[in-house]
Image: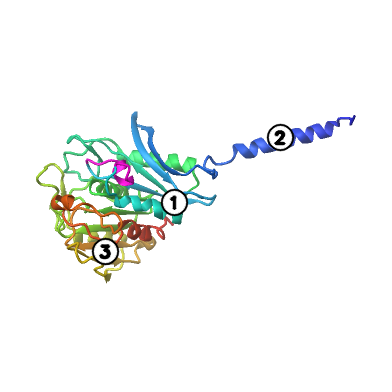
């Protein structure tokens, strides 16, 4: 029988401690074979309020830092409507395919009940009386910290986009959380005419706005006048000019007219890009000529019945692809 050596025992104990220490230092998101896909009905408590959210993890995420993208639903909507879980057409569903290819994490937060009885956001329209009164900036900020603790998030590549009320909420994040968010992309939402705060830092902005939007007027004015209490917005051009001046971009834009791929959608697309702002910021307007209050999409086309009330949906560009191509080279430094 081999005689046990004291030094061997000490070496064995040291090796075990090293292994345990190494395991304890691993990030919770060290890739696991099945730790990917859409995760729904998650909760987090913020300001003593239980908030809900969904999130999407692409397969083969790897170990390198990855971007984090927030997607904010419209007023009266919910996260299921963005992910396609509600069973309806969902242009935001395309984002998950892009995340699989580009490797980034998506978070779909839910708003809280507003005075109209649906879920919504406390966006930055200071004259809107039908928004909920909760701290939604604090909610998103808490989710940034939460996911940054769980996953290897690239702190310089955090983004936000959203439609309508969600687009307005992304603009509030641009105004109040630009120390953490590198770029935002509001869809069918312009700058509030009476905003709740001024910008903190330069930030890249991409707007997608339809010229025939029946709810959020392209030329500015009252939002959803048939509903009332939804506040007022600047025109698309005034919204762009606000950020061109603040970011100190070039004043002469690059203009591109997109091919009218679908000639039956009653709309065409023009992009107007102002570059070379402070910290390399850009300000972009995708002007959907003839477009209504719907996200452009080729893959996820809404019904003709919905278009009767919200206007034409453009099918010449894919909203998700356009916004990701804008986001992916924008960083905080």
Q: Secondary structure at mark 3?
A: loop
Q: Which segment is the magenta one?
A: 76-86
Q: Which residue is mark 1?
A: 104
Residue 109 in picture, x, y percent from top left: 34, 41
Q: Which mark is residue 115?
A: none
Residue 85 colored in magenta in the image: yes
Few, some or many residues within 10 Å of mark 1 (<14, 14–19, 20+): many
What whole-number distance in Å separates the C-alpha atoms at marks 3 and 1?
Answer: 25 Å
Residue at 28% over, 47% down: 172
Q: Which residue is mark 3?
A: 316
Few, some or many residues within 10 Å of mark 2 (<14, 14–19, 20+): few
Hey, which residue is sitting farthest left in the picture?
226
* Disc 2 versus disc 3: nearer the observer: 3
Residue 27 in picture, x, y percent from top left: 55, 41
Marked residue nearer the N-terminal end (2 or 3) = 2
Q: Are marks 1 and 2 in contact (CB under 8 Å)?
A: no
Residue 106 colored in magenta in the image: no
The way the protein has been coloured in the rendering is rainbow
Marked residue nearer the N-terminal end (1 or 2) = 2
* Disc 3 versus disc 1: nearer the observer: 3
Which of these two is toward me, 259 or 44?
259
Q: Secondary structure at mark 2?
A: helix
Q: Which residue is mark 2?
A: 16
């Amino acid at each position: 029988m081999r005689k046990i050596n004291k030094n061997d025992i000490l070496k064995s104990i040291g090796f075990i401690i090293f292994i345990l220490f190494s395991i304890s230092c691993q990030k919770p998101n060290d890739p696991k074979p099945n730790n990917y896909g859409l995760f729904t009905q998650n909760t987090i408590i913020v300001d003593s309020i239980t908030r809900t959210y969904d999130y999407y993890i692409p397969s083969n995420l790897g170990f390198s830092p990855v971007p984090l993208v927030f997607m904010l639903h419209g007023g009266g909507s919910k996260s299921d409507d963005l992910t396609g879980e509600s069973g309806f057409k969902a242009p935001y569903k395309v984002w998950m395919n892009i995340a699989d290819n580009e490797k980034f994490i998506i978070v779909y937060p839910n708003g809280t009940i507003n005075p109209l009885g649906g879920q919504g956001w406390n966006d930055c329209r200071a004259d809107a009386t039908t928004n909920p009164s909760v701290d939604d900036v604090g909610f998103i900020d808490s989710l940034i910290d939460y996911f940054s603790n769980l996953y290897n998030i690239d702190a310089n590549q955090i983004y936000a986009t959203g439609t309508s009320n969600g687009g307005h909420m992304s603009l509030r994040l641009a105004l109040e959380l630009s120390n953490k968010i590198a770029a935002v992309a509001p869809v069918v939402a312009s700058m509030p005419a009476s905003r709740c705060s001024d910008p903190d830092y330069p930030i890249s902005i991409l707007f997608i706005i339809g010229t025939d939007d029946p709810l959020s007027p392209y030329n500015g004015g009252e939002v959803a006048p048939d509903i009332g209490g939804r506040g007022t917005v600047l025109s698309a051009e005034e919204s762009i000019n606000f950020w061109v001046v603040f970011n100190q971009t070039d004043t002469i834009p690059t203009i591109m007219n997109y091919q009218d791929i679908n000639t039956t959608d009653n709309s065409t697309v023009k992009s107007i890009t102002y570059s070379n702002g402070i910290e390399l910021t850009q300000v972009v307007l995708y002007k959907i000529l003839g477009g209504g209050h719907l996200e452009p999409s080729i893959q996820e086309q809404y019904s003709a019945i919905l278009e009767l009330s919200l206007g034409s949906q453009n099918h010449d560009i894919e909203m998700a692809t356009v916004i990701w191509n804008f986001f992916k080279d924008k960083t905080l430094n």
